[in-house]
Amino acid sequence: MYFFFSVLGLVIIIEGLPYFCFPGHIKTIAEKIHEIDDSLLRFFGLALMLTGLLVIYISKKIFA
């Protein structure tokens, strides 16, 4: 459980970095996101999830 919460904490930190470092750019992106087609956003989300799974799989093979 400790590992899970450690990873969750790191994800939250990484998610918060752009808001801390580039708040102006985040506002601009947030204003334009409604113009992007839903299917493209879903594809991008799926690609990110699959990339995350691939990173976990490769790191498990290397470091386990």
Image: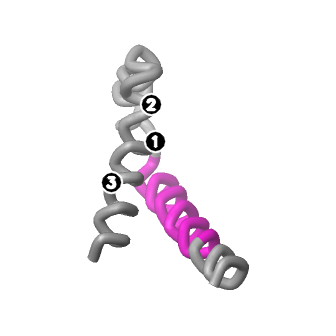
Percent position (x, y) of residue 36? 45, 42
Residue 9's tag is 3
Residue at image mark 1 = 36
| Viewer-side residue, 53 vs 43 | 53
Q: Which residues are magenta?
A: 37-55
Query: In the current view of this chain or complex, which residue is farthest to the top?
Result: 24
Helix, strand or loop under label 2:
helix
Q: Tag 3: residue type?
A: Gly
Q: Which quadrant would residue 50 be assigned to in this image?
A: bottom right
Helix, strand or loop under label 3:
helix
Residue visible at 40% across and 53% down in the picture: 11
Helix, strand or loop under label 1:
loop
Give whichever of discs 1 and 3 has the lower sequence position: 3
Give whichever of discs 1 and 2 has the lower sequence position: 2
Residue visible at 62% across and 69% down in the picture: 55
Magenta-colored stretch includes residue 58: no
Labels 1, 2: front one:
2
Q: Tag 1: residue type?
A: Ile
Percent position (x, y) of residue 25? 46, 20
Give whichever of discs 3 and 2 has the lower sequence position: 3
Labels 1, 3: front one:
3
Query: Relative to residue 64, is residue 42 drawn left or right?
Result: left
Magenta-colored stretch includes residue 48: yes
Judge the density around disc 3: few (<14), some (14-19), many (≥20) Cα neighbours within 10 Å.
Answer: few
Q: Tag 2: residue type?
A: Pro
| Disc 1 to disc 3, C-alpha distance | 29 Å
- In the depicted structure, whether residue 51 falls above or below residue 14: below
Residue at image mark 2 = 18
